Amino acid sequence: KMEYKLRKAEPKDVPDILRLVKELAKYEEMEHQVTLTEKDLLEDGFGETQFYHCIITEVQGEDSSDGLKVVGFAMYYFTYDPWVGKQLYLEEFYVMQEYRVNKNQTQTRLGIGSGLLRHLSNLAMKTRCTGMMFVVAENNEPSVQFYKRRGAEDLSQEEGWRLFRFDKNSLVKMATPAEE
Amino acid sequence: MDFSIRAANVEDCKDIARMILELAEYEKIVDHVKITQKDLEQDGFSKNPFFHGIVAEVPEQHRTKDGHTKIGYALYFYSYRSWSGRAIYMEDLYVMPEFRGKGIGKALMSKVAQLGLAAGCGQLNFTVLDWNKSSLDFYLNQGCTDVTTDMGYHYMSCKGEALEHLAQP
């Protein structure tokens, strides 16, 4: 039976957050793409300007003498849709493999992932957001199904929205005014 | 054509609200717009703004037949990528039809890029409708990538009843 605690992240959680970010990146075979450091996470999440918010989930370690272990997290921030207002944007959402609920297991309480999502949905409603937004890779079947089962709509498929990006180099080029 | 770009202030909300509706009309979804001028004033210009704006203006002699000199805008906010940190998201970019083709859209986007870089951002993200060929071409010409096509990233949303249901114990 999975007992877990869910709470707001604190500065001391930064090493665990980065560990989990790298674990998820490794699972997607993109570990080398993680350039974020603990220093960035500390400044950007707990400094003067807050760029992100984080919720973490902890379980009791195996021995009773072990402390609590951070096994999952959700990183989010608030965005704005000028047509319908505030949105909660879910940037990252991850639970360590060994702490996930198997479809085969009988469960007497929500798995950690579901618990995180419920907490975030609640938060979205409390802060008067009209929606929760996120991005999923279309070939990530388990994630796509996880979200669709809970009523998420695929705006790329249904409304034709494509996500575009300028990377750092293109940004620099674009920011430089052209010679007239 | 002479034009200037500057940060939006609360007095610009009337024109921004007008242009938001024009953009929604162009994107063929006007009835989706629920936000009013008052919402924009509260959400963009209070102590903790949820978005920022820049406005493009032309001198009086180039005003539209309805008397508008504010003829373009961009709305943006700061976001965060779990792998690379600070990013800037451009939510809206719009120039009134009669002022297009004069570099105003490019200048607005360039300003957003500058603001992003100044704030330490490593990416500028935004969405485009797949049928909007002239916009797709405009952006691809500026050197961006279509992350939906290249990486299969789909933009998802949980709203209305689905969100309420998810929030229930």
Image (cartoon, helix red, strand yellow):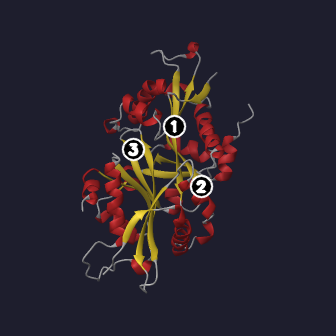
> Given contact means CB atoms under 8 Å apart, are the residues at marks 2 and 3 in contact?
no
Judging depth in this view, the residue of B95 and A132 nearest the camera is A132
Q: On the rendered structure, is A103 left or right of B95? A: left
Tell us which disc is closer to us: 2 or 1: 2
Element carrying mark 3: strand
Residue receiving disc 2: A43
Residue drawn at point x = 65 percent, y = 43 percent: B118
Q: How many marks?
A: 3
Residue drawn at point x = 52 percent, y = 25 percent: B71
Subunit of label 1: B
> Given contact means CB atoms under 8 Å apart, are the residues at marks 3 and 1 in contact?
no
Q: Amino acid at mark 3?
A: Lys
- Label drawn at residue A86: 3
Subunit of label 3: A
Which residue lies most toward the front here?
A65
Judging depth in this view, the residue of A58 and A131 nearest the camera is A58
Residue receiving disc 1: B52
Q: Quadrant of the N terminus of chain A?
A: bottom left
Mark 3 to mark 1: distance in Å?
13 Å
Q: Amino acid at mark 1?
A: His
Q: On the rendered structure, is A114 left or right of A19? A: left
Q: Residue A102's image quarter?
A: bottom left
Considering only vertical position in the picture, is A174 above or below A105? above
Instruction: Respond whether the residues carrying marks 2 and 3 are from the same subunit.
Output: yes
- Label drawn at residue A118: none
Considering only vertical position in the picture, is B140 above or below A58? above
